[in-house]
Image (spheres, helix red, strand yellow):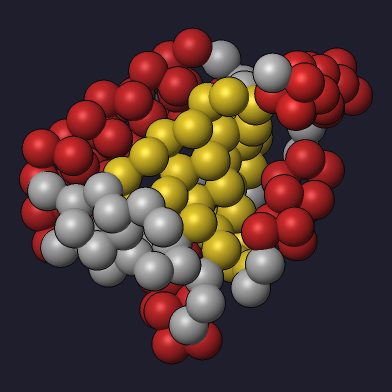
Amino acid sequence: MVRRIELDRSRYPLVVMRSGMDFTQGDWDELMQGMTQLILTGPFGLINDIRGSRMPDAVQRRAITQMYVDYEHQTRAHMLASGVVGDSSVINGIVTALNWLKPTPHPFKVFSTFTEAERWVLQHFSLDLRRQVMSQSVQGAAG
């Protein structure tokens, strides 16, 4: 289980974020820098696995909002889809409700399993990007 924050790019352009209960503000700032780099780099999809995680505090939520404001054009162009995986119906409901209040500039959906989220996010990829993910998956399994 992840204790801090992990931004796994090993299957890029499919990126997986996982966070635990013990992440610091420094970890969060590093995550925001990594997300900004991804948004500026090019098309990708995100799976945010929040199982076993704590919710971001108000400062951290504002950082997410500010990232969307500062990089709106690039986010619309480059973030193909974002799937959130949660193990709590309450947390999943909160995340869904927040998205209703302030919709993301990309497809967004909450799931109870990682497999469902991955399948859905990959549906938003071009055939070439899906092949790239599959190639990364095969390379990772062989390594």
Q: Position of residue 110 (x, y in %)?
A: 59, 67
Q: Position of residue 95 (x, y in %)?
A: 43, 70
Task: From the viewer's perspective, tell me whether residue 11 is left or right of residue 1.
Answer: right
Q: Quadrant of the C terminus?
A: top right
Residue 22 seen by the camera: yes
30 is higher (above) or lower (below) than 51:
above
Q: Nearer the viewer, residue 143 or 121?
A: 143
Q: Quadrant of the N terminus?
A: bottom left
Q: Based on the displayed image, in which of its 4 quarters is residue 141 positioned?
A: top right
Task: From the viewer's perspective, tell me whether residue 104 is left or right of residue 109.
Answer: left
Q: Position of residue 84 (x, y in %)?
A: 54, 59
> In the displayed image of the protein, which residue is found farthest to the bottom?
90
Residue 96 seen by the camera: no
Q: Residue at x 63, y 73 (%)?
A: 112
100 is higher (above) or lower (below) than 128:
below
Q: Residue at x 52, y 26 (%)?
A: 9
